[in-house]
Image (tube, helix red, strand yellow):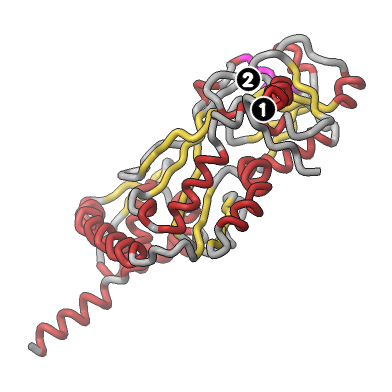
């Protein structure tokens, strides 16, 4: 018995669940940097945790290369054994959470910052009125070193890669159209086609790599060839730069319809990526998450939001459709 206890203590010293979680995230992402972002940790901390684990196990788990990291044979064996541990921990966590059938507690929604800022944030007060016991964390992913309070996670995203057994539900089609302020167009002229955009100032978001097949190649070429190209990783910053006459940009049609100063350029969209609602199926059984999921589906319902339909609806039609009583569009908050 004493010998068995000594072995148990030795195993505990060699393994730490937090380090195993870090190891699994690095193994799944194939990159220290990607794992650090996902774990809301710094890159040096993740690297140090992996080095500590390798030292305790007295073996190398990863081979570093220019593209990221690859598992060694020992690393692959550890991953094979650690995955059931991870699933068991998640099952225990969700089983306990499912006991809470009251719509109370915190839920974190991760989404692109433009969707959060211009569409979801204005709808938060109505959600609060209907669900006073639920607290929301709205994560735009802009400050990974300062994570929000964690709740049961639900995400809105354009990427469908490596989502495991999560539910991936198409939520909306986000149509992009060229826009600029009247002041900018009066000063610099209105381009008559996408090719002429290359002679104008442009403002764009750097994260246009996902669902690139939905983008008009001419729009991408015009953006790239523009001699006065301003880029940002923040949709909010980009939008307000355009509103301040910085140039022409491609914005979602719902954003184009929010501001009186914005004029649309052209009659068709230049991109139509699909926004997905992604969550663990066990999350849907928790009362507060069920309420948030219902709210999100309603907020993006194509039947009442013309911009989110699969077929393109020009922003000028939003107001007339509203008057006709067929579609509803929430006016901008000023």
Direction from residue 258 to residue 310 in the image, left or right: left
Q: Quick one: which residue is furthest to the bottom in this view?
A: 2
Looking at the picture, how far across and down is residue 163, in whole percent?
A: 37, 42
Q: Is residue 284 magenta?
A: no
The answer to whether residue 162 is above or below residue 10 is above
Secondary structure at badge 1 equals: helix
Q: In the rendered structure, find residue 313 and report the number of the disc placed on it.
A: 2
Q: Residues within 10 Å of mark 2 (few under 14, many from 20)?
A: some
The answer to whether residue 3 is above or below residue 290 is below
Q: Main secondary structure of the magenta part?
A: helix
Residue 115 visible to the viewer: yes
Residue in the image at 58% along x and 16% along y: 217
| Residue nearest the viewer, comparing 46 with 186 | 186
Contact between labelled residues 2 and 1, with CB atoms less than 8 Å apart: yes
Looking at the picture, how far across and down is residue 287, in whole percent?
A: 42, 58
Residue in the image at 32% along x and 53% along y: 62
Q: Is residue 220 magenta?
A: yes
State which region is magenta: 218-226
Residue in the image at 55% along x and 45% along y: 111
Label 1 to label 2: alpha-carbon separation: 8 Å
Looking at the picture, how far across and down is residue 241, in whole percent?
A: 79, 37
Residue 223 visible to the viewer: no
The answer to whether residue 118 is above or below residue 225 is below
**Which residue is label 1 attached to?**
253
């Amino acid at each position: 018995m004493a010998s068995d206890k000594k072995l148990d203590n030795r195993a505990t010293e060699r393994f730490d669940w937090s380090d195993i979680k870090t190891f699994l995230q690095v193994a799944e992402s194939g990159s220290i940097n990607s794992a650090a972002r996902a774990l809301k940790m710094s890159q040096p901390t993740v690297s140090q945790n992996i080095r500590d684990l390798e030292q305790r196990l007295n073996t190398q788990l990863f081979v570093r290369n220019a593209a990221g990291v690859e598992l060694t044979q020992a690393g692959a064996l550890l991953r094979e054994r650690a995955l059931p541990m991870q699933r068991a921990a998640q099952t225990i966590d969700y089983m306990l959470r499912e006991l809470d059938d009251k719509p109370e507690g915190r839920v974190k929604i991760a989404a692109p910052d433009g969707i959060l800022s211009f569409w979801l944030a204005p709808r938060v007060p109505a959600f609060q009125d209907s669900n006073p016991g639920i607290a929301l964390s709205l994560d735009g992913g802009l400050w990974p070193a300062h994570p929000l309070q964690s709740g049961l996670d639900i995400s809105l995203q354009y990427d469908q890669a490596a989502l495991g057994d999560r539910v991936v539900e198409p939520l909306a089609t986000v149509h992009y159209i060229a826009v600029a302020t009247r002041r900018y167009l009066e000063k610099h002229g209105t381009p008559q086609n996408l090719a002429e955009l290359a002679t104008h100032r442009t403002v764009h978001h750097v994260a246009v790599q996902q669902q690139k097949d939905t983008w008009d190649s001419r729009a991408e070429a015009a953006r790239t060839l523009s001699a006065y190209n301003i880029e940002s990783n923040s949709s909010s910053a980009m939008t307000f730069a355009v509103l301040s006459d910085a140039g022409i940009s491609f914005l979602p049609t719902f954003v184009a319809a929010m501001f009186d100063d914005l004029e649309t350029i052209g009659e068709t969209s230049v991109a139509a990526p699909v926004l997905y609602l992604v969550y663990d199926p066990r999350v849907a059984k928790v009362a507060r998450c069920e309420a948030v999921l219902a709210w999100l589906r309603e907020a993006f319902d194509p039947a009442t939001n013309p911009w989110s339909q699969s077929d393109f609806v020009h922003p000028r039609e939003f107001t007339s459709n509203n008057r006709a009583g067929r579609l509803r569009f929430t006016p901008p908050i000023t």
